[in-house]
Image (tube, rainbow, N blue to C red):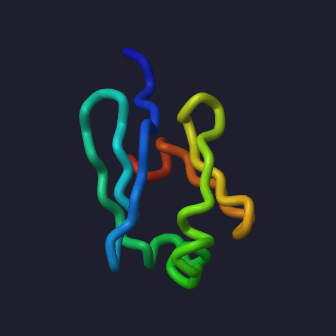
Amino acid sequence: MKEPLTTNLYFDNYNLIVELNDGRTISVPLEWFPRLLNASKKQRNNWRLIGKGIGIHWEDLDEDISVESILK
């Protein structure tokens, strides 16, 4: 079975919401990621996928989050 990959992400007031290529949508609290929690909307929305979707990178925040870490 292939590892799930991120296809898109967005935020609500309290959560990071990640869409995966297997059809799941995973929501995790922003408080798990203090850099994202304390970031501006502009900083949060400046992200790119890394490794074809195995992770997400925020250049402005020097933050990397893997799909694996979100699923654990």
Q: In the picture, residue 3 is in which quadrant?
A: top left
Residue 18 in the image: above or below residue 45: above
Residue at horizontal 54%, vertical 63%? 45
In the picture as drawn, the residue positioned furthest to the front comes out as 42
Q: In the picture, residue 36 is in which quadrant?
A: bottom right
Position in image of residue 34 (x %, y %): 56, 78
Left or right, residue 6 beside residue 29? right
Residue 32 in the image: above or below residue 22: below
In the picture as drawn, the residue positioned furthest to the top comes out as 1
Position in image of residue 10 (x %, y %): 40, 58
Residue at horizontal 41%, vertical 30%? 4
Residue at horizontal 66%, vertical 59%? 58
Residue at horizontal 25%, vertical 32%? 23
Position in image of residue 22 (x %, y %): 30, 28
Quadrant containing the N terminus in the rendered view: top left
Left or right, residue 63 beside residue 66? right
Position in image of residue 42 (x %, y %): 58, 73
Residue 66 in the image: above or below residue 20: below
In the picture as drawn, the residue positioned furthest to the bottom comes out as 38
